[in-house]
Amino acid sequence: MPAKWLKDAVFYEIYPQSFRDTNSDGIGDFNGIIEKLDYIKSLGCNALWLNPCFDSPFRDAGYDVRDYKKVAPRYGTNNDLYRLFGEAHKKGIRVILDLVPGHTSEEHPWFRRSQSAEQPNPYTNRYIWTEHWFAGCGDLPYIAGEAERSGTYIINFFKCQPALNYGFLKPREPWQLPMDHPDCIATREAMKDVMRFWLKHGCDGFRVDMAASLVKYDDERKSGTCAIWRNVRQMLDAEFPDAALVAEWSRPDLSLPAGFDMDFILNDPHTRYATLLRDYNEPVDNTYFRKDAPDRDITRFLDIYQGWYAATRGVGYISMPTCNHDTVRLRHRLDETEIKLAYAFLFTMPGVPFLYYGDEIGMRYLELPGKEGGYFRTGSRSPMQWDASKNLGFSNAEADALYLPVDSADDAPTVAAQQDDPASLLNTVRALLKLRHDNEDLQADAPYEPVCTEKGRPFVYRRGNLLLAVNPSGEKLFADVDMDLDHREALFTLGMADAAHGRLVMGPQSFAVLK
Ligand code: NOJ
């Protein structure tokens, strides 16, 4: 059973580098997040996910952890983070941290010991070492020529991220340890120890990086990796029953039964999520929410989603993010109206939605040179745009000292500029999230069922007793639905919607919730 507080949770993802700098060093900090908690609350978000904020050489923006139990000084101190937990809780906001269990930085003391010439030591098998000094690692990515000890080691992502050793499901060579080897169990226990540390200090759970990556040569259904997560879940159930875990996995049918409360559906081709929001890498851009999509078809997404929804109902939640720190922002290809409709859909579907900082004002994807291993992703990591003051209110540092430049466009969106306009994207987000909080039928658990999925019709769906419809096209569309239309009233609309005599008529680019 997922943690109870998730039922009405809406998360806000913060890339701490770029949110709010209070000590004028050009980079965001914990005090900046504390300063903005009321703003976050005003959006209707009641939970935060912070990208990794731990000590790190930052070769992958902090996903290369050097010390799991110490925050990076550039964001403040551990005590500042504990204070953030406390202040957030006072306002009814939960905070989850980013747990990176699959790899560490090559500068982590565990790895320094593991690679040293003095062998054996307690960390000899904390990482995956082959017996070969140069090659011979099968198809796993490895690094040679860097270690003091003889052998090559396996990496999990970048070169700077050696893979932690949770063992192999079916070892094929002597250097491949089985999952029940005491040293592999010790890795798992070390990660549980990290989780306990932060949970005891007041964090509410974790977003789990590359959650599927733990056991090597795992089978199709990831049974090795799932067994580890089930073991972790047992610990949480016994010691921190309120803690929530969200997986970066995109296989809710596997991750949720293994003990995750939520799983993100991301843009990997198998999820078909991109067909909704960013299908522009295909030969024809049929992004569902694009007004001019030539062959709009919601079933391209639902063909996968429906199966996952049915398989995981009551077990855990599917999470659909507006974007994240690895993805191109929606504003890159969608205009404001298209984005409003996309959010209307995302925020009224079952599961737990995630809003990426700045998406509430339609921040742009900027063409920026890569920073801290960001590559193309850097363009979605630029500073939050608060108002028209220096550096758009992000920082008082000189512009050339900023972590990343702010959007220099004359019409760069800001919170201040949208604050008083009831029709702004910002206030539309607020209205949608308020609608969700006010109506249990729109929250995580309420039943969901597609009602009309035909091409050339609005997508009509039911949540509890509510009927919802979205028409992203530029034309007026109708759907004949036998759901008591004559007695329903509109709870919320964007654009024009009309219902009578069994026919739902949706104006161009419209959305409606009918009660
Ligand atoms: C997924 C994270 O979201 C991404 O930013 C990171 O680079 C990789 N995992 C490696 O940890």
Image: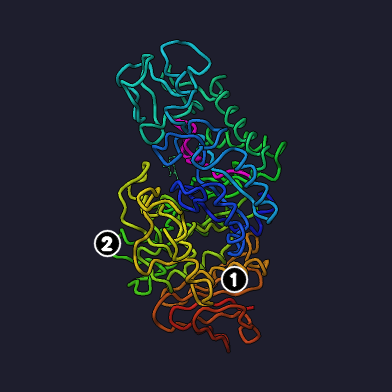
Instruction: Evaluate whether residue 474 shows in this view.
Output: yes
Which one is nearer the viewer's eye here, 432 or 363? Answer: 363
**216 in relation to 395, above or below:** above
- Ligand 1 quadrant assignment: top left
Residue sitting at x 63%, y 63%: 443
Q: Which mark is residue 315?
A: none
SS for dot 2: loop
Residue under label 1: 462
**353 in relation to 253, above or below:** below
Residue sitting at x 43%, y 81%: 508
> Which stretch appears magenta?
205-220
Residue under label 2: 283
Q: Quadrant of the C terminus?
A: bottom right
Percent coordinates x, y for residue 90 in the rendering: 70, 53
Which one is nearer the viewer's eye here, 196 or 165? Answer: 196
Percent coordinates x, y for residue 192 in the rendering: 61, 32
- Name the amino acid, label 1: Arg
Q: Is residue 499 left or right of residue 172?
A: right
Q: Is residue 378 left or right of residue 179?
A: left
Which one is nearer the viewer's eye here, 291 or 115? Answer: 115
Is residue 212 covered in magenta?
yes
